[in-house]
Image (cartoon, rainbow, N blue to C red):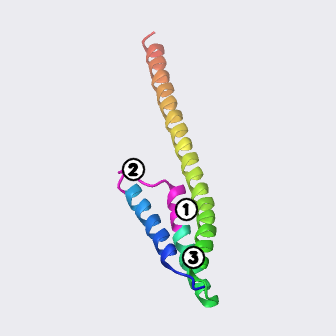
Amino acid sequence: MRWSYRPVGVGLLAIVMVVGINGCTGEPLSEREKGTLVGSVLGSATGAIIGSKVGSPGAGAAIGGALGGLGGFAVGNELQNQEVANRQTQKMLEQQQAEIERQRRLIERLEQQMITE
């Protein structure tokens, strides 16, 4: 029985189409999505190269894509979590700056009151 590359090609084409359609939604990809996509593509390419050496580029691409996607998801997830933490820290800093400025104005008013009394 001869193995056909057609199902693998159709599957890869479907993945490319889904990613392409998702890219047209107008919303930028999150770090998690970018990591998963890059990991899957690199894993598929690497898996296909390794698989071709043993006679199964399709299986190698599928396995490499899955493993690369998982690794890319993990890296992208960590980057996204760091981005969220940085935004929260920035928001806290801005709130503290606003409070410092409010207290500075209050001190100036009190000093003015003491001078006029």
Residue 114, percent from left and from top? 48, 14
First of labels 2, 3 by sequence position: 2
Residue behind mark 1: 36
Residue 32 lies in the magenta-colored region: yes
Residue type, mark 2 in image? Glu
Which three-letter amino acid code belongs to the residue tagged 1?
Answer: Thr
Residue found at x 56% / y 78%: 58
C-alpha distance separating marks 1 and 2: 16 Å
> Under tag 1, what secondary structure?
helix
Looking at the rendering, the stretch of residues picked out in magenta corresponds to 24-38
Residue at point 51%, 64% (across, down): 37
Q: Position of residue 3 (x, y in %)?
A: 57, 82
Spatial CA distance of label 3 from label 1 is 15 Å
Q: Residue at x 48, y 21 (%)?
A: 106
Of mark 1 and mark 2, the one earlier in the sequence is 2
Chain-order first, disc 3 or disc 1? 1
Q: Quadrant of residue 105?
A: top left
Tell me the kind of residue under disc 3.
Answer: Ala
Residue under label 2, please give it: 27
| Residue at the image point whose x is 43% and y is 18% from the top | 112
- Pick the front one: 97 or 64: 64
Tell me where residue 68 sits by quadrant.
Answer: bottom right
Residue 34: image x %, image y %? 50, 60
Callout 2: SS: loop
Question: Looking at the image, is 3 positioned above or below residue 65?
Answer: below
Q: Secondary structure at mark 3?
A: helix
Q: Quadrant of residue 75?
A: bottom right
Against 62, residue 19 (above or below) is above
Which label was assigned to residue 61? 3
